[in-house]
Amino acid sequence: MDNNTIKNVFREYIHPLDMKAIQKKIDLAQVDKYVKKLDSLTFVKLFIYAQLKNLSSLGRISEKVKRKKTVQKTVGIESISKSQLSRKLRDVPPEIFQEIMHHLIQKLHQEIGPHKADKALGKIHLIDSSTISMCLSQYQWADFRKTKAGVKIHTSIIFSDGISYPNEVIITPARPADSTQLDALIVLDQDALHVFDRGYFDFDKFDSYCAAGIHFVTRIKSNTIVHVIEELPVDTDSDIIRYAIVKIGKMKHPLYLVETLDSEGNKISIVCNDAKRSAKEISDLYRSRWQIELFFKWCKQHLVLKKCYGKSANAVFNQIYIAMITFCLTLLMKSKVGFQGTLWEMFNWIGDFWSKSLPELLKKLFEKPKRSSKGRRRLDHEHIFMETLAQYESQETSHLDDLTYDPIF
């Protein structure tokens, strides 16, 4: 018998998780030393299920386990209380989930990276952060304004051939500036090109990246002092209005400056330290930065992120890492089955068919539309008129007096 016939969708979905490696990390951290019921592997499966089903509270997770036999069978427990879930979420070190996420990212590199790499642009790493706001009275450890608390998700994503996936995710309280995490998000690869916005503006870092051969594209601030070394020719048919070799601020290394207009006609000034890039490429690369905004938007809309399960730092960080793990698993599943729809559609299919067999899901995913109609048919009025006229001329008109029959409709 084919092994696929006995695999349900959820088991296949979490298959990329290396459970033995995860168990070793758990044993090393002694997280489950005195645990009798909710061990860490069960916890991982349960909270991934909660992300798939958009369960926004520990109470709802507890109820699903209690009422759904399929959930009990899949995760391996018959009941669990909110307090037990809360304690586990608080006690598991976030580093464990961060390592699980890194393991899945490596799988994404293997599955997607080499096959989808854009040879023209190379490896594009988009860098930015997104803040999740929280109530200050409940999360005082994460204060960053007088009336607000929050955490920042510092992220580097790889964007290639229309696909975005995380390369690194670092979670911190929201107060530290974005630039404090830039070095941790940079990849020491001369083939990679990093794209980030003005929140990461730092002359010293830029000089060190130039010296190390790390390529980047960023936008300069309006008050940045620019020393022109050489003006370069500009294609008059392009949207580039200026191209020059410059030094900015107190930097020692020269950069390429590109000035262009945004969609509203405002001038934007972009710098790049990669001599191989044309002015048009530099402009296009910076515009691609919005892909990371779409990544954050997707995660916040479709994963359980905006409402926190717990109030401790561990609980919040663990929830975010599990959401990123869910994103990676969904993208891996989409790639594995060869689904050509959107990631959101794939996510919904998995959520709907999570307890069914894998062949059932595959059959639905690739099922041809049953409707064979080409749409609403238009009447051939000319043909109907000529047919009616022929009937009239041949005196076959008795049916015209029958009110129960309309010769046209």
Image: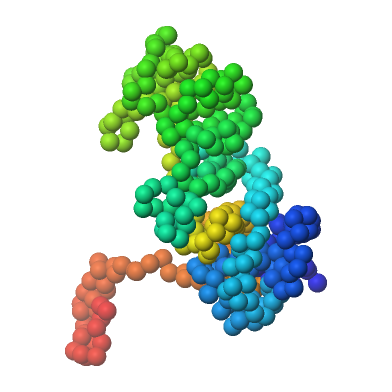
Given the current orientation, which residue lies at the most extreme left position? 401
- Residue drawn where x is 61% and y is 33% of the image: 187
The correct choice, above or below, for 252 with respect to 43 in the image is above
Give the number of marks. Answer: 0
Tell me how the rendering is colored. rainbow
- Residue drawn where x is 33% and y is 23% of the image: 223
The correct choice, above or below, for 292 with respect to 303 in the image is above
For the C terminus, the image quarter is bottom left
Q: Position of residue 233 (x, y in %)?
A: 39, 13
Which of 126/150 is in front?
150
Q: From the viewer's perspective, is 10 left or right of 293?
A: right
For the N terminus, the image quarter is bottom right
Which of 116/328 is in front?
328
Quadrant in the picture for residue 40: bottom right
Which of 393/2 is in front?
2
Quadrant in the picture for residue 340: bottom right
Can the viewer see residue 45?
no
- Residue drawn where x is 53% and y is 25% of the image: 205
Q: From the viewer's perspective, is 256 left or right of 224?
A: right
- Residue drawn where x is 51% and y is 22% of the image: 204
Can the viewer see residue 307?
yes
Q: Position of residue 321 (x, y in %)?
A: 59, 54
Q: Position of residue 41 (x, y in %)?
A: 71, 64
The correct choice, above or below, for 80 with respect to 173 in the image is below
The correct choice, above or below, for 310 with respect to 178 in the image is below
Q: From the viewer's perspective, is 356 left or right of 342?
A: right
